[in-house]
Every structure is written in C-alpha cells, then in structure tokens.
Image: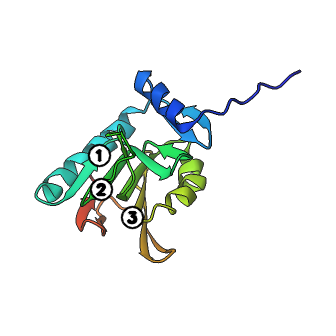
Amino acid sequence: MEQAKKTHVAPDEYFAIEDASEIKSEYYHGEIFAMTGASFNHNLIVWNILAALHKPLKHTTCFAFPSDMKVQVDEDKHYTYPDNSIVCGDIKFVQDRDDTVKNPVAIIEVLSDFIQDYDRGSKFTSYRNISSLKDYILINQYACQVEYFHKIGGSKWEFDEYKSSEDIFTIKSVNVKLYLWI
C-alpha cells in the first residue's frame, strides 16, 4: 500500500488558503493542520477570560484577543491560533497582515482531550521561543485546574498550579487577577 505524499506549503500559500477558508488551520513547517470545533465549556471559558480581561486592560496599552488572532511562533515556519492571547505596547504584525501578531506577552490555551499533550509539550516548547512571551496558561475544561507558567528571566520558567474553585492567580505580565470560579 502506498503512503500519501505530504505536500509542503509555503507560508504565503498558507495565508492565501486561510484567507479563502471558512475553517481555521495552524501551520507547522510547511504542513497545514485544520482546527476542530470547540465544546460549549471550551467556548465559555475563552469568553469568560476575555470578559475578565476587558475592564483591567481597558485603559492600558494591552489588548486581549480571542482565538481568531493568529500568533507567529517561528517566522515562516509556525503559526498558531491560541485560545486567548495578550499583546502590550506596539502590536507587531506579520508583514502585510492584521490577523497575525508576533509579540504576545501571554498565551492562554484551554485544554481539550485531543490536543492537551501537544499544548503541554511541543507547542509550549515552541512558544518559549517567542521573546516577548512572559506567561503561558493552560486551563482544564473538564476539571478545576489551571497550570500557570511565568518566565522569570532568560530561559527560566516558574510553575504554579491551581485546583480550587476559590483560587485566584495573577497574570503577572499584565498584573490582572483571574478567579477560577469564573
């Protein structure tokens, strides 16, 4: 049996496909991966995070984005759709694009059974190469659990985990508190 041949897609082709498509896809080293739909809980968590960030960031130079804003992880090699991202100061967009940022300070992913290993593993490894990134937050949609990673210098990250509905944690890069009961 012959295996299917992988087709390499150039970054500009990826963006053209994305612009014409009704579905979102991530790009990784020449391959395109379609994103699946999200559950009710997943969408509710993403919406609640945006709502919680709106007022504290309103009169700052920071912007919180939902999953429709792409992030350039590695120029011309890796583009993702985080569930939420935060950018502060001057937003740096990929050339000729207003839907792909290069300088997030925080990325939030809501874990799904299908891709939670990717979000914890190789995706986080890739995200750590974004020089502006200070906070990486993983939220379990099936249980009361948040995994919070904060960059404390160079390539060193500290980790905190929250498991109580009464826990409060601060996204340190923007000094915003989030409550687990949201």
Other residues around mark 2 within 10 Å, as few (<14) / some (14–19) / many (≥20) = many
Asked if disc 1 and disc 3 are in contact, CB closer than 8 Å, the reply is no
Label 1 amino acid? Phe
| Residue 15: x %, y % from top left | 46, 32
Judged left or right of residue 43, residue 147 is right
| Residue 90: x %, y % from top left | 25, 57
| Residue 127: x %, y % from top left | 50, 57
Asked if 159 appears above or below 38 in the picture, the reply is below
Other residues around mark 1 within 10 Å, as few (<14) / some (14–19) / many (≥20) = many
Question: Which residue is found at the position 58% from the left and 35% from the top?
Answer: 10
Disc number lying in front (1 or 3)? 3
Q: From where the camera sits, is residue 114 visible?
A: no
Which of the numbered marks, if any, corresponds to residue 104? none
Which of the numbered marks, if any, corresponds to residue 87? 2
Report which quarter residue 136 is drawn in: bottom left
Helix or strand or loop: what does disc 3 sit on?
loop
Q: Earlier in the sequence, mark 2 or mark 1?
A: 1
Q: Earlier in the sequence, mark 3 or mark 2?
A: 2
Q: CA distance from mark 2 to mark 1?
A: 8 Å
Query: Label 1 belongs to which residue?
Result: 65
Query: Label 3 belongs to which residue?
Result: 132
Other residues around mark 3 within 10 Å, as few (<14) / some (14–19) / many (≥20) = some
Asked if disc 2 and disc 1 are in contact, CB closer than 8 Å, the reply is yes
Asked if 108 appears above or below 21 in the picture, the reply is below
Report which quarter residue 176 is drawn in: bottom left
Question: Which residue is found at the position 24% from the left and 68% from the top?
Answer: 175
Disc number lying in front (2 or 1)? 2
Which one is nearer the viewer's eye here, 64 or 72? 72
Label 2 amino acid? Val
Label 3 amino acid? Ser
Task: Residue lying at the far front in this picture: please name it.
Answer: 96
